[in-house]
Image (cartoon, helix red, strand yellow):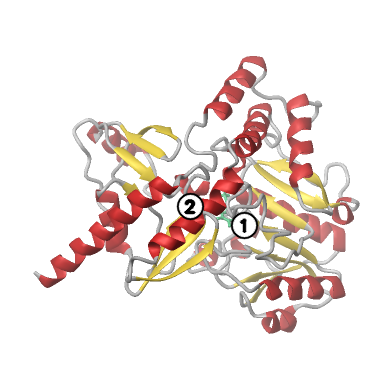
Amino acid sequence: MKVQPSKTSAGTVASEEKSQLATYKKMPIVAERGEGVWLYSDDGQKYLDLYGGHAVAGTGHSHPHVVAAIVEQADKLLFYSNLVHSEVRARAAEKLVSIAPQPLTKVFFCNSGTEANENAMRMARLASGRENVITFSGGFHGRTADAISATFLGKYRELGKPNVPGHLQAEFGDIESVRKVADETVAAIMLEPIQSMAGVRTARPEFFSELRKVCDSLGIALIYDEVQTGVGRTGEWFFAGSEAGGGIVPDVISLAKALGSGIPVGACLVSEKIAAHIKENDLGTTFGGGMIAMAAVNATLEAIENDSMLENVKEVEAHLRNRIGEIAQVTQVRGLGFLLGLEFAGQTAPIHKGLLERNVITGTSSDPNVLRLLPPLCLRASDIDLFVDELKAVIANLGSQREA
Ligand SMILES: Cc1ncc(COP(=O)(O)O)c(C=O)c1O
């Protein structure tokens, strides 16, 4: 979409276009501030944000508890590396482990989703002494060398050429395809339990229990990339252990995005079985576990609890599914909690654009017929009502344009 800058934002858009690599298809918004589910642009427009800055604004934009914790920590100590102990880091690690499903008892902090996945794969290789990793068609795991080599979605893997060797592909949801490539050379099977970018693709609970069996019988580590599904997005802290996933718990969960409410932070939650093989200096990072990021993690998890956001996600998801039933053009609502894909009979690009023109931000996906919703976990039923009204108006407009 061509950016149409307003008068006040024209200078910012021109400046970014002049100085920043043109690697993003940007919306015509110059973001100035945010509050909860609302994003405000510098020309005074207010947007209902159902995209959450790519699933990052889990607690909503600039949640006051998170902001206060960051400011307080910034005043004390911005950063020191992992070579010292830190109370704020100890609290974050303990809290994360306490909400993780058993037997995930250890955490390793890093800075992003791709880094969490790289470390997850490395741990599985170190623990097993094997090299191969199985990932799935439609999965997205990041853009650094090993993670992009594990990404069998669209053009991404090509962009990462030459790829890291040892990456094998199976079909998401198809356990037979896994059995064909799984053997005693495989260190890990890694998957997004709900494939977000691919158009919010889900699998049956039995798929996850079958995967667990394959892993257990061959000594393979199971890794869930919960960069999107983690930290409350599905209405549970994690997809791992949930009913939708057959109660199955992997050996490693990778996290990022909503974990710091916008402060960059990633993490791997790890079972004792894997952790026992990881020695001093096997993994490392300068910034991971820094004090500001840890303050953000603590406050994010507290805000989710204090504001009963997990319960809210479930309630508001039910309301959304109910109200979307009024729109005949939506053929299916895919996903879980606040990771939802609205499947239309035709292409969603005009709907996405029409909604944006009516101040509602949604996400596209690699499936042209699926509109993605990744809103803050504090989204209310009244926001859904507004969204449904706007969606109906957009669809009516597109219909009348077609007739004209
Ligand atoms: C499922 C999943 N894994 C990994 C990543 C990579 O995360 P990051 O961009 O923080 O490196 C993403 C990013 O969109 C993602 O959606």
**Residue at image location 54% in from the left, 37% down from the top:** 262
Taking the image as shown, residue 323 lies to the left or right of residue 161, namely left
Note whether 115 is above or below 15 in the view shown: below
Q: Which of the pair 13/96 is nearer the observer?
A: 96
Specify the quadrant of the image occupied by residue 303: top right
Taking the image as shown, residue 174 lies to the left or right of residue 353, namely right
The outermost residue toward the right is: 276
Note whether 71 is above or below 394 in the view shown: above
For label 1, the residue is 145
| Amino acid type indicated by mark 2 | Leu
Report whether the residue tagged 2 is closer than 8 Å to ligand 1. Answer: no
For label 2, the residue is 374
**Residue at image location 79% in from the left, 31% down from the top:** 90
Q: Which of the pair 150/337 is nearer the observer?
A: 337
Q: Which of the pair 9/387 is nearer the observer?
A: 387
The quadrant in which the N terminus is found is: bottom left
Taking the image as shown, residue 2 lies to the left or right of residue 237, namely left
Q: Residues within 10 Å of mark 1 (few under 14, many from 20)?
A: some
Q: Residue 17, image x and y in percent? A: 31, 41
Residues at marks 1 and 2 touching, judged by CB atoms closer than 8 Å? no
**Residue at image location 43% in from the left, 33% down from the top:** 35
In the image, which is nearer the foreground, mark 1 or mark 2?
2
| Amino acid type indicated by mark 1 | Ala
Where disc 2 sits, the SS reads loop
**Residue at image location 39% in from the left, 46% down from the top:** 382
Q: CA distance from mark 1 to mark 2?
A: 27 Å
Q: Is residue 157 visible?
A: yes
Q: Is residue 23 visible?
A: no
* Count of all numbered marks drawn on residues in the image: 2
